Each structure stands twice: as C-alpha cells, then as structure tokens.
Amino acid sequence: MELNERKMKILQAIIKNYLETGEPVGSRTISKYTDLNLSSATIRNEMADLEEMGYILQPHTSAGRIPSDKGYRLYVDNMMLEKEELLKNKEKEVDEMKEFLVEKVDRVETLLQNMAKMLASNTNYATMITAPQAHKNKLKFIQLSQVDKNKMLCVMVLEGNMVKNNIIDVEEEFDNETLLKLNVLLNTSLNGLTLEEINLSIITKMNNQAGKHMELVKRILDMVATVISEEDDMEVYTSGATNIFKYPELSDGSNASRLLGALEEKSELTHLLNRSNDESNDIQVYIGEETTVQNMNDCSVITTTYELEDGVRGTIGIIGPKRMDYEKVVKTLKNVKEQLGSVYSKKSIEQDDK
Amino acid sequence: MELNERKMKILQAIIKNYLETGEPVGSRTISKYTDLNLSSATIRNEMADLEEMGYILQPHTSAGRIPSDKGYRLYVDNMMLEKEELLKNKEKEVDEMKEFLVEKVDRVETLLQNMAKMLASNTNYATMITAPQAHKNKLKFIQLSQVDKNKMLCVMVLEGNMVKNNIIDVEEEFDNETLLKLNVLLNTSLNGLTLEEINLSIITKMNNQAGKHMELVKRILDMVATVISEEDDMEVYTSGATNIFKYPELSDGSNASRLLGALEEKSELTHLLNRSNDESNDIQVYIGEETTVQNMNDCSVITTTYELEDGVRGTIGIIGPKRMDYEKVVKTLKNVKEQLGSVYSKKSIEQDDK
DNA sequence: ATTAGCACTCGATTAAAATGAGTGCCAACA
DNA sequence: TGTTGGCACTCATTTTAATCGAGTGCTAAT
C-alpha cells in the first residue's frame, strides 16, 4: 500500500490534533478538521489503511486513533519542517533569553542551572543539562599551593575556564622554591593536553624529572585523573521534573514514580545525552523506545549539544510525553543553542556598550 | 480533663499501631492490642475523651482514630524516649556506615551526596543535606593567579578545607612581583576572618594599602562577598524524593506534585534546615504545619546538624509522612551525626592502621 | 467504673445499567 | 471505482443502586 498525499494529510491532521488535545482522534473530527471535504466514512477507510501500515493505532476497539512511534517518527522527520520558517518569528523569546543570559553569566554552574529552570518553565517539560565535560578539554593552568602543614591544594584551570580543585594530604612541608619548581614542571609538562591525552609516556617522563618528589607528582597525576574522570565529572542540572504531572499518561499509576526515579537516578539519562553528543551536534529526537531507557518508553526526549567556547561542550535534553510539542521545543532549543554559543562574546560586547 | 496514665497508654497504643499499619485504628484493636484488659466499649469512651482533648481525630464518622499533630507531638516529646537505649543495639548499621564513609571521603560533595543516597534508601524517606555554609567559616588561604592575558583566578580555602574559586576579568597583565605582593596583602589582611567579619573597616584599610591596584582589590573583595554569599552558597543534596510514592497520603491526587515541587524548589526547605541549625544542634522534629512549608503539611521533617570539623557545619533533613518511623529515623540520624563528626579523625586513624 | 448490646453512620466495594464516542462493513450512488 | 449514508456493534466511562462492614455512640445492666 502506498502512502499517498491524502493519507499523509490525514495522518498529519491526526497527529496535529492529538498533540493539541491529547485525546484519541476519531474519523468525524478529521472529516471536519481538514479541508479535504471527505465524509467520516471515507476517513475511516483511510484510517484503517494507516493503521495497517503502522502509523497509527487504537487504544481500544471503540476509540479514535493515536499516532504510533512510527507515526511520530514520520512526523518529526518529514512533516515538521515547514514550520521552521516561523523561527525568526519569536524574537521576543530570544530577547528574554538574551537578557537573562547576560545578567547571570558569572558562573557556568548557575548559568546552566538557571537555563534549565527557564527551559522547564517555558516548555512545561522536564529539562536536563549536562555541564561541559572536563576530560575533553585542554589543561590551561595547574598550580600547587601549600595551605596547611600537611595539606596541598591543587587547582586546575581548563580551557573554557572551568576550574577544578582538590586537596592532597602530604607528609612534609615544602619550601617556596621547591613548590615553584614543581609548578613549573607540572605546567610545562601538562599544559595544552587534554586529560585524556595525559598518558603513560608523559607520566613516566615526568616522574624522571621529578627527582625526589616523584611520590608527590605521582599522587598529583592520580588525582588529576580521578578528580576529572568521566564519572565524577558528569554534573547534571535538572529542572521541572514535576512538569510530568501535567501529562496523565506519564503520571498515572506507577508511571510517575518510575519516571521520576529515572530522572533522579541521572546516570541512565546521562548516557542518552552523551550519545546525542556523539551522534551529531544538531538536534536529535528520541521517541519512546528510541530513548533506550527503561521507564521512559512513554516519553520523548529532544536533545542538542551546546558549545560555550571552543570545545567546551555539553548537552541539553528536554523530556516530555510522546505527544510533546516537537515544533516548539526544537525551535526553542535552536534559540538556546545559538544564544549559549554567543554568551561569552555577547557579554563582552554588552559591557563595552555601557 | 486529665491525661492520666491509662489514657497515655491508650494513646501510645493508637499511635504505635497507626505508625505500623497506616490505617485508622479502632477501639476493638486497642482492646486486644494492649495489656490493659479493657473492653472495646471502655476504650471507646477513653478515645472519645482523647479526641476531645485533641490528641486524636477521626477521618470520618465511622472510621477509627488517627493521631493529630498534637498527638504526634506528645509522642515525640514524651513517649519515644524509652527506646533510645536500643541505640547501641544496631551496631551493624553503624559498621556499614563506617565502612562506607571511610571509602568515600575524598571529596565532601560526593561524601554528602552518597550519604543522602544511603539515608534515603535506609529509611525509605526523602533526604536532604545542606553542604557546610562557607560564610560562617574562617578564611585560611587566598591566592590570585594569572591564568590568561586578561583572566585572574582567585582561589580561597576555608577552614575545613572547603575550596571556592572564581575567575575575574582584568585589563592588564600583572608581573610576578606585583602578584606576589597582592597575595601577601590579601592573606595578611583576610586570613583568620570569617567572611561575615570582612567588614568595611578592613576593606578601607586594604584599599589604602593596595596603592594603584585599588581597583582590583576592590573587585576581589566584591567577588569574595558574592561568591560566598549565603544564597549561592546553599548547596543542597537530595535523594529519594520518589520514596514519597510509598505513602499514599503523600502521593494521592495532586499531593505528589505539590510535594515534589517543594522538594525541587529547594529554597523553602533550606530555610527549614537553617532554622534547625540555629535552634539547636541536637535532633529536631517538625510535625505537619510546624514545618511552616506550604505543601508539606502532611509531612514531618526530622533534622539534625552535623559537624565535619570545627565550625564546618551543615544540616541533614529526613522528610516523610507524619506517620513516619520517628524512632528509627532519630536513631539513624544520631548515628550518622556521630559518624560524620569523626570522619576526618577516623580516616587518618584507619590509614595509620594499614 | 465497666461492659454487653444495639442502632446507626458512612466510606468502600460490587453490580448493573445507561451513555456515547467511535468503529467496521455493506449497500447505494455518482 | 471511489465516496457516502446508514446501521449494528464494541467498549471505556459514567451513573445509579445495593450491599458490606468496620467502627462509633449511647443506654441499660452489672
């Protein structure tokens, strides 16, 4: 059977209607809704075909139809494009965002946390943002300082000015000169490398140069590795988890509990976001089972990566019901991505203006 | 009317039974449950009295009784004591915790996050832990470094080895000597003070000594103030929010949404925990409206402050239904408090042992 | 003061009936 | 051959009624 233009139109009408109402949509509704001027009986026949083809399905015998995952997929891939032109339309949203961003840029963490909050409240879906991943960025600066008789502070600044630090216990106290030497050694050996690149050959080389402080250097390198290891590093900001209560299909029965559990236990979601990070840096839509997350089969997730500065990348994910407003979310995410990309340049411009 | 011993016994039996079952308890149950050897009719009379006095209430006419807030209060204040002896009984829990703590002490944040997780899963209630508040701690060490042509990194170490940092934009590049001078100035002027104590007189004094770098010093002081201001500072770790689904009275209807909202919007909860921090450093119980948090009138919150090192204090809060197992939670919190208090000393001991 | 007994209340459970949105299919029509 | 009106049928939802039973309050007897 062929998916001709009329069937497409009907399918699109079904999906659009379902996205708006959340109710299964019947033949009569479509008959009136579209400009096809067809009777409900004809629509019924077409719907039967569409169901056979797997694009829609019936919750039960005497109900209307709702889109299947396959139907949503078709919609997202092929039917949604047209509206993208309206993107420029919503300049107000952009403005609001811009203002918001410029004010709050002092710390990346708060920026992202607030961004998550804003997205959640603008979209009415749950939002999740991963902080930029340190282990992929170059080390820009590293410094040891003695803060106590037996405590050393090690601070690292990564590209994008992410700061990481850790305190190390030491036995001996170091004089200023040794400290200076050590710092020079660390900086010359490590700067410009990503944390992934700090490999064995560099480590042994450093150990040789470290002389009697080999032990300490070893521990520092260990520390660098663990502190900024992928797992610890995965900071995630979430917001609007309770938005799921706005969608009965997500919050009925034990659904709410399971879904919120998945959101709280961030690890699985993180995988999804990371996957999206790898796959492409444009916008990704995962529908139902495509999320590959247990307990999220009734959800869709829309993700995009953002880039604050060169190589300083993270991922944003919007989690909603399968009948979420894909167009709006995609549009919003495009805006956000763009805005975040220019946060730092914008900021200095704004300041010059003053 | 007097609350004689028999009434007390009956009230206690009602509460105990209700805590266990979660169902309104009737006269017949009590008649059999207690060793008072009274008929259900007698119990009924006493219950009517207890209701009149406000310690219990009926959800509806033909139901049993449940404790009122006043009843819970009495229970928590006067009836719960006896069991405290059993505290030493559960050494296994302590052991488990100890092991857990010793392994994970590397970073305070992860320690607290894991602790929250453990508490949530051990108690089956929601858990919330505030990180130690920086603004009450003394500054131990402060250091400026140039990481970029126009970026300065300012790192502060507080008592208890909490590290805070921030990046400051600067116009000029500083040579090593000036930087050294500035660092000496900052350290001599500020070390040993709490952030609250860094007041105007010190600021003006510093400005005088800063000479031509007055501008920068000013900005650093501003930064110190804002970075570690009370609000930004309020990091909170939560876990087990979804536990509320185990208690229908908290998750029926719109309750779940409202309550989870309150948990997500941490600010209000934070106030409660801070209050507890001020009021006493022992264990506090807030029942129902005593929480003074909208949307949490059906909850009880049990809090305690912990102290990692001298002056490094935060608060733990366990949030559950009013019929939560007060005894168990109080006991557990006492253990946790104790364990946390000795984390750092313990750790070094353990290490010496090896 | 305690208790057995009894009428009464009222939420919860179950059963049955009514409703109505929507379908599938068939026969007629253009 | 594609379209349509008509009709019987399905089935979740809503409505109504009936029943159940845990628990109470009150009274009269012990």
Image (cartoon, coloured by chain):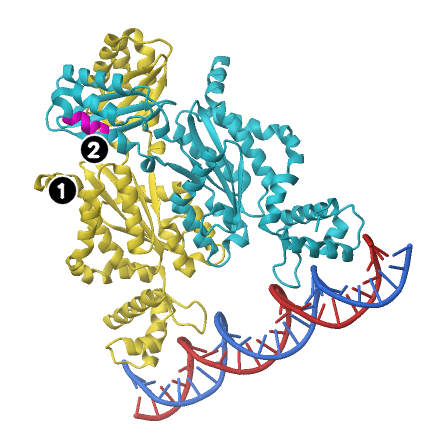
Chain colours: A cyan, B yellow, C blue, D red
Q: In this view, which residue lies farthest toward the left?
A: B353
Decide which of tag 2 and tag 1 comes sooner along the chain.
2
Foreground: disc 2 or disc 1: 1
Q: Provide the secondary structure element on which disc 1 rests.
A: helix
Q: Amino acid at mark 2?
A: Gly
User: Three-letter amino acid code at disc 1?
Assistant: Lys
Range of the magenta residues? A215-221
Q: Position of residue A190 (x, y in %)?
A: 28, 21
Residue identifier under label 2 = B160
The quarter of the picture where the C terminus of chain B appears is top left
Q: Is residue A39 above or below residue A73?
A: below
Label 2: few (<14), some (14–19) or many (≥20) C-alpha neighbours in 10 Å: many
Q: Residue at x 47, y 30 (%)?
A: A306
- Which mark is drawn over residue B192? none
- The disc numbered 2 marks a residue on which chain? B
Which image quadrant is residue B124 in? bottom left
- Residue B346 is tagged as 1
> How busy is the neighbourhood of tag 1: few (under 14 within 10 Å), some, or many (20 plus)?
some
Q: Is residue A225 left or right of residue B94?
A: right
Numbered disc 2: secondary structure: loop
Q: Compare residues A20 and A2 and report the one nearer the observer.
A: A2
**Quarter of image, res B227:** top left
Count of all numbered marks drawn on residues in the image: 2
Pick the quarter of the image with the N terminus of chain B.
bottom left
Q: Main secondary structure of the magenta part?
A: helix
Kindly check if marks 2 and 1 are in contact, taking CB atoms under 8 A apart as contact: no
- Chain for numbered disc 1: B
- Cα distance in 3D space between marks 2 and 1: 15 Å
